[in-house]
Amino acid sequence: MATTKTPVDNGVNVQALLGAREAVKANPQAAQFQWRAKCEWVYGTHSQTAIKKYFGLGQDQQHKSEFTFDTDHPEIFASEDKGATPVELVLAGLAGCLTAGVAAVAQMRDIQLRSVSATLEAGMDIQGILGADSDVRNGFDGIKVTYKIDADATPQEIQAIVAQSQKRSAVYDVITNPTNVTVEVV
Amino acid sequence: MSRCLTERSLDHVVLERGEVANSWKTERWDSLRLLTPNWQSRLPGFGYEGADPDGFRTMPETIAFLERYADAISAPVRAHTQVTSVRPSGDGYVITTSQGDWESATVVLATGACNVPLVPSLAEAVRTTIATLTPFSYRKPKQLENGGVLVVGASATGTQIAEEIQRSGRPVTLAVGEHVRVPRLYRGRDIKWWMDAAGILDERYDEVDDIVRARNVPSLQLAGSPERRTVDLNALTRIGVKLVGRLAGLRDGRAQFSGSLPNLCALADLKMSRLLDRIDEWAKETGVDSEVDPPHRLEPTEVDASPPLFLDLARSGIRTILWATGFRPDFSWLHAPVFDRKGRIRHDGGVVEAPGLYLMGMPFLRRRKSSLIDGASDDARDLSAHLASYLDGAPELPHPGRRNS
């Protein structure tokens, strides 16, 4: 009995990505992107960041609509809890980047995903940010990401997809490697 | 290549800036052994005839082997002849050397892929109180001060040197970037035996998905030792080497390491599994299965729950940094428009994008084994055939001759 395999669809346009890769190899200038965000202080520890415009492929671009993110501190920090904390948004960034990578790599490898969920945990000793102990860093002391993936693939293939996603992840790189940050006042 | 040209009665000279086997004599550390077994480190008509086919030649043995070969084929070597420039001229090339100039219709570039140790630019930030070495200046642990050593890079060179330095009583911290892990022995046979038998070393450059990536694969974490030991990260951890992530920054005497160590180790373990799966499949298909031990897998690479992300070099007693961060070829003397925007030679399996110019001995030049001693033979055979037909088609070209001699 002949069986036809249903084409794998994780919703990622792999052809477009491969095409983009070849195009930027031929024209590296087009690969220079700049991501942008604008933040307005609201009150207390509550701020609002808006994201719409960015630069890439040689010209100014913009998202279909503006995305806004409220950030705040929780009530146990004597704040109003009007939004997730900034460090929690970093976890959202990492999760989104790695998970997008999982979908893209799975599509490239012709593997059908059925469900993918990630749990993230990041420890932090707040003596750092409170200035209570100068030996304690401000940031995370580590991040743990746990994936549960149901897919048409062997456990080894799934491990390989997750490993490859980290290898090509922007946020993973931002977090695991140093990045220059310059802050000016105008 | 010389042997092939001689067989075709093609007049040629071999220009060598030092003596035969120069890099083996001057650019290798004392304890280095080939990482391919003796039976596999062969040249055409010149196999291994000693009593230890599964062993690994030392540097003196490798040098002697190459000297005997040069002699046996009566290679027309001009030693102590440094090429300072190769330039297109008319229908051929002018080769300027420390011993005078040559003209030739064709030139074969066989200077190898490892002329210059690569050292990251952040090395400039290392304080002068700390000694820095590359594999070219490293000879043996004794030359190092007592105290800690930071070895940067965990491929073949980094792992081998880290092991011997740790064993000398100097604590080693090893900064691990991308690497390729393999067992020395698998199912009772040498991994190079498997790669040879299963046709992996013979894979062609035009049959591989991404040749640029394949040519940039780091050297396998392999070492030649009489005990045929596996020198992987777990073996190093067992003798006390401390693993940290890729060196990502160096400032004010503080080294910064990437937080990606667990993933780089996972990637290497997965890649090794794929290689061993492929070997197992081949063994099954060919019936070799019944002649070897059953399949097995190595323990995953152990990584600390929280490897250090930085090291205060002075406070942690680091007295030396060894840059095992790779090599690059030096073609600064080649004045032909054959380089891409990243300074790499443009070629098709060794046929350079300039008439009459050929390249040998680079990683995956024509086959996966191209940069191994055993790879020279097939590549030379292919390229000398191309060279010969190029000369046949070329109108009235003189044979290589001295200018104004």
Image: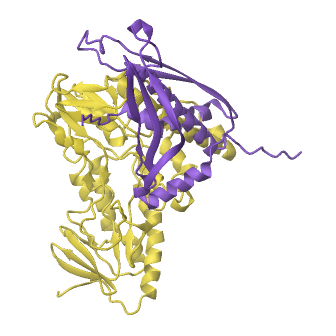
Chain colours: A purple, B yellow
Residue B215, visible in the rendered structure? no
Judging depth in this view, the residue of B262 and B238 nearest the camera is B262
Give percent across and percent down for residue A184: 25, 35
Question: Extreme right residue here?
Answer: A1
Give percent across and percent down for residue B160: 32, 37
Q: Quadrant of the C terminus of chain B?
A: bottom left
Q: Is residue A128 left or right of residue B295?
A: left
Judging depth in this view, the residue of B264 and B122 nearest the camera is B122
Judging depth in this view, the residue of B82 and A43 nearest the camera is A43
Q: Is residue A184 left or right of residue B192?
A: left
Quadrant of the rendered image containing residue A11: top right
Image vertical order of residue A185 relative to residue B346, above or below: above
Judging depth in this view, the residue of B63 and A82 nearest the camera is A82
Quadrant of the rendered image containing residue A40: top left
Numbered marks: total: 0
Give percent across and percent down for residue B131: 14, 37
Give percent across and percent down for residue A175: 39, 30
Q: Residue at x 41, y 53 (%)?
A: B41
Question: Extreme bottom residue here?
Answer: B396
Q: Residue at x 47, y 62 (%)?
A: B366
Q: Residue at x 40, y 51 (%)?
A: A32
Image vertical order of residue B126 relative to residue B166, above or below: below
Residue B276, visible in the rendered structure? yes
Quadrant of the rendered image containing residue B322: top left
Q: Quadrant of the N terminus of chain B?
A: bottom left
Q: Residue at x 44, y 8 (%)?
A: A75
Question: Extreme front residue here?
Answer: A42
